[in-house]
Image (cartoon, rainbow, N blue to C red):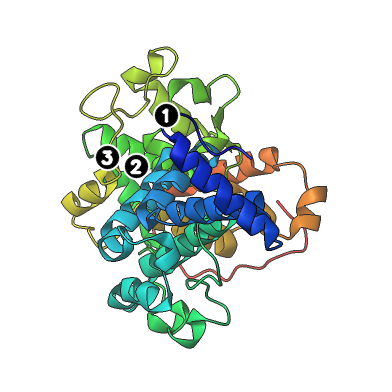
Amino acid sequence: MGLGPYPAISLAKARELASNARTLKALGSDPIGQRDASRATERLAAVRTITFKQCAETYVKAHRVGWRNAAHASQWENTLRAYAYPHIGVLSVQAIDTSLVMGVLEPIWTAKPETASRLRGRIETILNWAKVRGYRDGENPARWKGHLDHLLPAKSKVRRVQHHAAMPYAQLPDFIAALREQDGIGARALEFLILTAARTGEVVGLRRREIDLKSGLWTVPAERMKAGKEHRVPLCPRAIAILQAIKPYNEEGDALVFPGSRPQKPQSNMVFLMLLRRMKLGHLTAHGFRATFKTWATERTNFPREVIEAALAHVTGDKIEAAYQRGDVFDKRLRLMTAWSDYCSTKPAKEINVVLMRSKSHV
């Protein structure tokens, strides 16, 4: 049994330690086993002084590469920094209990239910990670089912979901006409967004390499899609014309198609909201035009639901259905988006009431 190095352990100290070890052995104990157990206890005590903030930062760093985009990591960091760290950031992760978790969540649970719900899930994930790493024991005090669901009202009961304000499709042709009178790249980008039924982030982040004009195709890479899956967007003639008229489109490689004030800086996500406000339509959102498109396609066309949902890049059906549905109905979506463009660009001379007769055949 090693007793320690000389001169850190003097000869007299070594004799004392050896004598103590012989006494333990004579009493039936294992002095080496006791020494190892004592060292393990000391190491565990030291490990469990790691704070919640340290665990959270390590978790985010380890998982950042697997998340679909940098914004996801920023959301994690921002919510934890704003709401969790002030309450539990400096506390040992082992010390986190239900009362401390409630202290984080209760102040915002009714005022910001969506944020609070996501925060709870992130705290739960971090505490699970800490347990697997050996930094804490016991049940997870941030778990929802069978625990916090007895202490907090369900998110759905706190406040009704507020949907993005959408323009009635009957008003859209007039709006498009007014939008084309607006100067600036933001107006062109908004019209392109409407014509492609895309999301704001997908349009403001659009780069030259994603466009194939000859094929009339926009390929949005997986890392820029909400579902984390590559999305092919058919471009109608008007959408292609918008791209051809924009100078950055003619540049090569990574050039932004709709740049901000500086060529390498994208437009702010607020650009469309500010444009709508200037047009006295501040109650609307850019995202709401996706709802306008879906309502028009559902009520005014015979295109199948799966084609409409594919145009919106929505994930539909269960895993079994997805396993068999491998295509993206691109050709049908091209006809749908061309019909949508025609509708946006054409206003009937006279408003009439029409009762649509739906047939079993599909367009």
Q: Nearer the viewer, residue 56 or 249?
A: 56
The answer for how far apart the CA atoms under marks 1 and 2 are is: 77 Å
Disc nearer the start of the sequence (3/2): 2
Please tell me which residue is depicted at 28% across the width and 66% down the height of the picture: 87
Query: What crowding class fits label 3: few (fewer than 14 Cα within 10 Å), some (14-19), or many (20 or more)?
Result: some
User: The residue tagged with tag 2: helix, strand or loop?
Assistant: helix
The answer for how far apart the CA atoms under marks 3 and 1 are is: 66 Å
Q: Residue 268 shows which numbered tag?
A: 3
> Between tags 3 and 2, which lies in front?
3
Query: What crowding class fits label 2: few (fewer than 14 Cα within 10 Å), some (14-19), or many (20 or more)?
Result: many
Disc 3 + disc 1, Cβ < 8 Å: no
Disc nearer the start of the sequence (1/2): 1
- Single out the residue that lies furthest toward the top: 252
User: The residue tagged with tag 1: helix, strand or loop?
Assistant: loop
Q: Quadrant of the N terminus?
A: top right
Q: Disc 2 marks which residue?
A: 190
Disc nearer the start of the sequence (3/1): 1
211 lies above or below 184: above
Please tell me which residue is depicted at 36% across the width and 36% down the height of the picture: 204
Relative image position of residue 162 (x, y in whole percent)? 38, 71
Q: Is residue 271 visible?
A: yes
Three-letter amino acid code at disc 3?
A: Ser
Please give left or right for residue 337 compared with residue 199 in the image.
Answer: right
Please give left or right for residue 218 compared with residue 359 in the image.
Answer: left
Q: Is residue 69 visible?
A: no
Disc 3 + disc 2, Cβ < 8 Å: no
202 lies above or below 53: above
Q: Disc 1 marks which residue?
A: 7
Q: Residue 77 shows which numbered tag?
A: none
Please give left or right for residue 320 compared with residue 295 in the image.
Answer: right
Three-letter amino acid code at disc 1?
A: Pro
